[in-house]
Amino acid sequence: MSKLRYIIILTLCLLPALTWAQRRYSANEYHEKELASQRGFSTKDVENSTDVLFGLHASEYAGAHHLIGFSAEGSWSSFVSPMPASRVAPGGGAAGFHLLYEFQYNGFLLQTGLGVAYQKVFTNIADTAIYHPGMTDTWSSILPAQFTLKHSFTERQDMSQQAYGQIPLYFGHYFFGPQGIGYFLAGVHATYAFWGNTRQKTLISTSGLYERYVGVWEEMDNHGFRKDVPAERTGSQLKLKFDLMAHAEIGYEYNTRQSARDYRLRPSDRLDGRLRVAAFAEFGMLNICPNTKNVFYGIPDETIYDFTTYRMDHIFSTADAKAFWMRNLFVGVRLTFLFGFQPQEHCILCDPWRH
């Protein structure tokens, strides 16, 4: 009899708490439906969704995602080499476009695809002087004189442009912060130049050093001595070798599911679009210097005073460059757009009265 008394007393004590819980649950349910109604959703949508407001749901980034899209990039670019005569500056520009496939599992990213890139690089060349001793001044018929002929090449700049085919393979991860969703990618892409051409510009001056006379003779056209004569030559494609470029990028991602509340209230709208803005850098891992034997400057003896017959080839296509390595460098900005479909949302911890 005493046990039954204790049970009755305990039930009476718990009855107010049970009543309060029922009222609280009804209020939450009413608030949930009211908020959904204000956002344009029906009561049926709320009842069929998985605790849209108060349950603990999986992130929209959880699980496996398959995304396709494209990227466009622009960068400063140059050739890097220890060759003393070449300069990294001023460099040039490059632009690329890639079709992409990306696999995402939770925070992990794997990206590959197929792309093309265009590059135009200006390489400044150190001033060069070439001496020809034992020349005879044939302009004087009375007393021919021996002298040393000097060729000066100044303000030379070599231009090369090429188009590349590229296959990227990048790995990365998301990092989530209070300001949004960041990410980084790192990896390599195979690169091969399939088209291009070159152009060389310089100023040519000639002067004579006569042992019989004091000083240097210059700017005397009747003796073949001229100053700062512009010269320009065009050439074929720079035969760059196959390359593996190391790639690293870090940036911010905006997606159509940026609002978790919207993600939960729209279970039937699964289109997942992602826009990324990133800074990136790429550097060649292999020596791509062409294996050619062109000449830096070619001056025919029979037309030594005729500048139009002189030959110039791009500095990295000459025999002088073969002793040095040369690598590509890119630094710029990359825009990426990816889209796919969201997997079905699932609830990790839901309202115990309804699930």
Image (cartoon, rainbow, N blue to C red):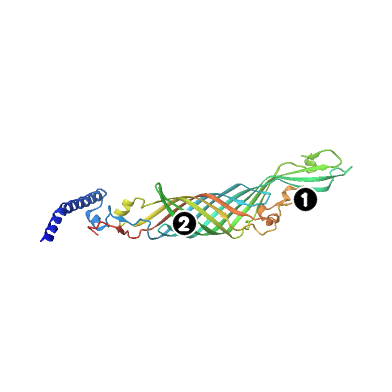
On screen, residue 4 above or below 202: below
Left or right, 60 with reference to 77: left
Residue drawn at x 55%, y 56% as measured from the top left: 246
Residue designated by label 2: 172
The residue type indicated by label 1 comes to Thr
* Label 2 vs 1, first from the N-terminus: 2
Residue drawn at x 80%, y 45% as measured from the top left: 149
Q: Position of residue 133 (x, y in %)?
A: 82, 48
Left or right, 326 with reference to 336: right
Task: Give me the disc on residue 210.
Answer: none
Name the outermost residue toward the top: 214
Tell me the CA gap for discs 2 and 1.
Answer: 60 Å
Indicate the secondary structure of the residue bearing disc 1: helix
Indicate the secondary structure of the residue bearing disc 2: strand
- The reply to whether residue 180 is visible in this rendering is yes
- Work out whether residue 106 or residue 191 is closer to the camera in this orientation and state it: 106
Q: Position of residue 105 (x, y in %)?
A: 41, 60
Q: Position of residue 251 (x, y in %)?
A: 46, 50
The C terminus lies in quadrant: bottom left
Residue designated by label 1: 303
The residue type indicated by label 2 comes to Gly
Left or right, 19 with reference to 326: left
- Work out whether residue 280 or residue 195 is closer to the camera in this orientation and state it: 280
Examine the image and state in which quarter residue 2 appears.
bottom left
Examine the image and state in which quarter residue 271 appears.
bottom left
Image depth: mark 2 or mark 1 in front: 2
Q: Residues within 10 Å of mark 2 (few under 14, many from 20)?
A: some
Labels in figure, total: 2
Residue drawn at x 32%, y 56% as measured from the top left: 57
